[in-house]
Image (cartoon, rainbow, N blue to C red):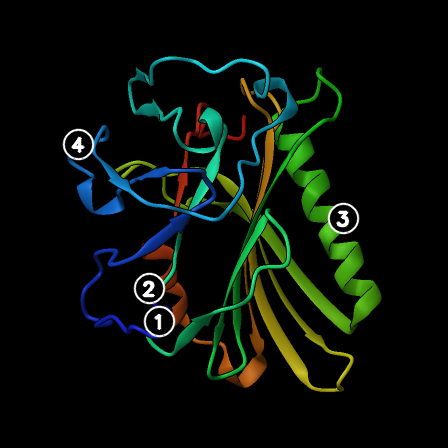
Amino acid sequence: MNAQHRRNRSTPALLASLAFAALALTACSAESDPEATVPVLSTMRNTQSASGTTETQSSNRTSGDTYIDQTLNGGAPAWNFPLVFENWTMAPRNDATTLRLDSDAGCSYTATQNPWTGDPKANDRDETQRQADEWKAKLAAETTDPVFTVADSSDVRGIGDSTVTTLRADATYTGADAKPGRSTTWFRTFATGTKPMTMTLEYTCPAEAYNEEDLNQLLENTRLMNVEHPSLD
């Protein structure tokens, strides 16, 4: 796909997307049929957890609002991420766990996913909080005067109109370049699922370039797939 193609911002439907998967992704535009898939040849390697690498299940699983697509990251949680967006360009990928869009205004929109290998007795909320705390500590070490607000969020969507509870962290700070910055980040660790993963979605900008409309449109075109337990609790 050509990352220079631009979409009409007034059209919320996903025109192009890149999933963290090997061959296929569930189409956000086919929300009425959760089993509909759009064939995609993705160069993103499978990042499923180690517990899911030795056995391939032969069929997808559906339970209530939960739909697990085994062709997406081996059934592990996976981001469905916009590849094309007006005034944004897909950044070169340096690893298999991260996708990033960069804007003409100096903002970035980044999705990451990694296998989670913590304590099997852990729960999603505690591990998601740990994930957010580690991010806060890292940002505090790299910036000055950081101010954080962290709360539960239902901003991130899964299949159809379903929502996935995350921790949302809003931050303002002064960067290493002595300029003010602003970011919004969503965290979720799936510690109790069949294939544990840790997921992050981050929107970061120079403070004057932070744009709620852009952020909302990007979120509208992003999905968190293969979620067994949407709630943090």
What kind of element bears circle 2?
A: helix
Measured in 3D between alpha carbons, the distance from the residue under mark 4 to the one under mark 1, in whole angstroms, is 28 Å
Quarter the C terminus occupies? top right
Question: Of the residues shown, which amino acid type is indicated by label 3?
Answer: Glu
- Disc 2 marks which amino acid? Gln
Q: Where is 174 relative to 97, above or below?
A: below
Q: Residues within 10 Å of mark 2 (few under 14, many from 20)?
A: some
- Residue at which label 1 appears: 213
Mark earlier in primary sequence (4, 1): 4
Q: Nearer the viewer, residue 111 or 163?
A: 111
* Helix, strand or loop under label 1: helix
- Cα distance in 3D space between marks 4 and 3: 38 Å
> Percent x, y for residue 15?
24, 59
Q: Position of residue 53 (x, y in %)?
A: 58, 21
The quadrant the N terminus occupies is bottom left
User: Circle 3 — which element?
Assistant: helix
Q: Nearer the viewer, mark 2 or mark 4?
A: 4
Tag 2–tag 1 contact (CB < 8 Å): yes
